[in-house]
Image (tube, helix red, strand yellow):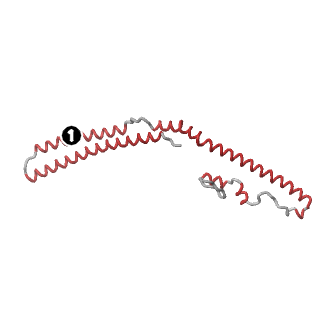
Amino acid sequence: MKFEFIEQFIEQKNKRNEKGQEYAKREQDAIEQVHALKFEYEKTIAESVKTDKPVDKKLDQLAAKIEAAEKLVERRTEERYLFSTIANEEISSDDVVDAFNSDFFSKFKEKKMEPVLERLLAVKKEFSEAVFAYNGVVKEFESERNAARAELGDSYHYKLKPIKFSSELEKEKYFITDRDLRALSYGEVPVGVTIDG
């Protein structure tokens, strides 16, 4: 299940970025035009000094072009700035948050999370019932063992085998341990468990 509304937001953002790049390019082109005109102006002055020919008319024309180009740079800079500060979005970030937290969240929870939570509760109940059954079987066995011990006497007291887990390895194999829970919280499969798929 995908949050498809974000795709519309991303598309809008990409279009806005492209438009912003257009404004930045227009500004950069205007700046480069000023530099080119100033270079030509300086080149014309240098040529005039070398050749000792008057170029006042040409310099006046270049100065006027430079002034116009500098005004264009100011305008292009202001356009780019205004574009970056004016939000003309159809879909705002708040719209995305609202759509995610209301519509998508509830549908995702209902379709994906609720079945998993139901499985967890069922497994928790089944595990609890299995532990109670284990404890009941141990209690029943111990009752029979204690009755036999009472009849055999003290010298046979420790010769009758217990059925209750006597080692940590046995407990870890059949019970859910803190280590298992830690492994699960890190997204790892607990030791001794095989998961299909």
- x and y percent of residue 131 in the render? 75, 50
Q: Residue furthest front?
A: 197
Closer to us: 75 or 153: 153
- In screen coordinates, is 116 left or right of 75? right
Q: In which quarter of the image is residue 60?
A: top left
Q: In which quarter of the image is residue 125?
A: top right
Residue at x 86%, y 54% (from the top left corner): 143
Closer to us: 14 or 33: 14
- x and y percent of residue 159 in the render? 85, 64
Q: Is mark 1 on a helix, strand or loop?
A: helix
Residue at x 83%, y 52% (from the top left corner): 140
Closer to us: 142 or 110: 110
Residue at x 43%, y 42% (from the top left corner): 10
- x and y percent of residue 95 in the render? 47, 36
Asked if 67 appears above or below 142 in the picture, the reply is: above
Asked if 144 appears above or below 57 in the picture, the reply is: below
Provide the residue designation for mark 1.
68
Residue at x 13%, y 44% (from the top left corner): 59
Residue type at numbered disc 1 = Ala
